[in-house]
Image (spheres, rainbow, N blue to C red):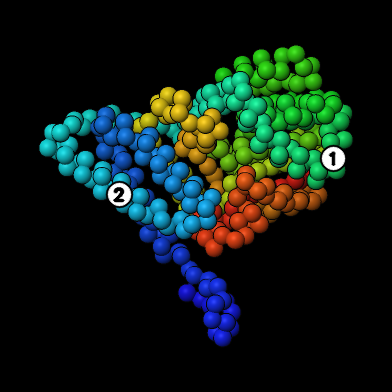
Amino acid sequence: MKIVAPTHHAYARLNIDYSERSEHLFGRLDKLLELGFIQSGLLRKMKPTIAVALKWKFDYLCKSLESPFEIEEDVEYWIRTIELLNILGEQKWFEFDDQIQSVDPWERTAKGFDLGWTTTTKGESFENSKKIAKERTDQILEMLGGPEFIKGKEILDSGCGPGRYIDLLRGLSPKRICGMDQGIKLIEVLNDRFKNDPSVEISQGTCEKLDFQDNSFDFVLSNGVLHHTSGDLETMLKDHARVLRPGGAMFIMLVGKGGLELKMWEFIRGFLNDIPLETMLKFFGDSMSPLRLQGVVDHMYGEYQETTQEEFEKWCDPIFKHIERVPGIEGLDVTREIYKNDPFFEERFGCGHIRYLCYK
């Protein structure tokens, strides 16, 4: 514990080191994960509820700025519950089995987003989800000098998902928008969604290696995509800069590094290793907001690579003329300025989200 003001300031805020408590909570999550590998049909029926209960409790503590360590009592409860179930299983109250499932996390991620986006953005849900993209689009365009930046330009949305940004930007008179995604179901949905707009091209591919020529686009979007792949982040960033024309701009978002939130997501992905995404979507599909259901897909079935702001800026230095940090938006983002009143920011979120405009 360290006091950050003179000792005569009796009510000065204390800067407390929570690293040991964080490590303890990490260890208890690891213990719960270990217990989650007990194989039984009964436990597999309970896992979706356990995962959502823990995630939503953690999310609530984030929104209310309450201590993230309050989740400890919930973790301990589920540890004791599964330990009890293990004892009862040994007494033949229910049967154990050997249905061990080996899943490649990155393949699971790719398939998860293909299924997730096409499930959670049907009909009116697409319009609701697009509201998030509009706030970001408005912010980016303001930083780029206004909507006129898009007029007559060629744009790449790399990892475009259901096409929310395509739908918003095509109304600003671009010359061409190319939406690229690797999802098979998504490509079908995108081709149908934009079939009557000649300015929109849909391409199937992966952001790990872009299948476009050098200097093909004036504006490139990579919104929360690169960190969901197994490719080298710096190499992929260079590849996206390669297809950007000199004088063009790229918007990129990546998760940061460290913090209890990313640890919680990592734990849940391991805990749900033997629970197919189809099961989760069926289990909660009729009772959960589609926007929150997409959070299940993103955080519980999407693997992440982490990086720091310092690492990212170092990668940018030799490939862009300059970069500009994109501030957080209230209610959408995890950044220090948004959570300036949160005494647990670093413990909760590590370095926070990384968003930049990069100019070539």
Q: Residue sitting at 74 percent across and 29 percent down?
A: 168
Q: Quadrant of the C terminus?
A: top right
Residue 152 appears left or right of 10: right
Residue 64 appears left or right of 211: left
- Is 287 or 19 nearer to us in this picture? 287
Q: Amino acid at mark 2?
A: Tyr
- Whether residue 119 can be seen here: yes
Residue 146 tag number:
1
The answer to the question of whether label 1 and label 2 lie on touching residues, with beta carbons closer than 8 A, is no
- Location of residue 320 in the rendering, given as x and y in whole percent from the top left corner: 77, 47
User: How many numbered markers are drawn?
Assistant: 2
Residue 201 tag number:
none
Q: Residue sitting at 76 percent across and 42 percent down?
A: 140
Q: Is residue 211 above or below residue 147?
A: above
* Mark 2 residue element: helix
- Whether residue 210 can be seen here: no
* Mark 1 residue element: loop
Marks 1 and 2, how far apart in space?
A: 52 Å
Q: Quadrant of residue 100?
A: top left
Q: Residue sitting at 72 percent across and 26 percent down?
A: 167
- Location of residue 152 in the rendering, given as x and y in whole percent from the top left corner: 87, 28
Q: Is residue 331 above or below residue 155?
A: below
How would you rate the neighbour count of disc 1 (Cα within 10 Å): few for under 14, some for 14-19, many for 20 or more?
Answer: few
- Location of residue 205 in the rendering, given as x and y in whole percent from the top left corner: 63, 25
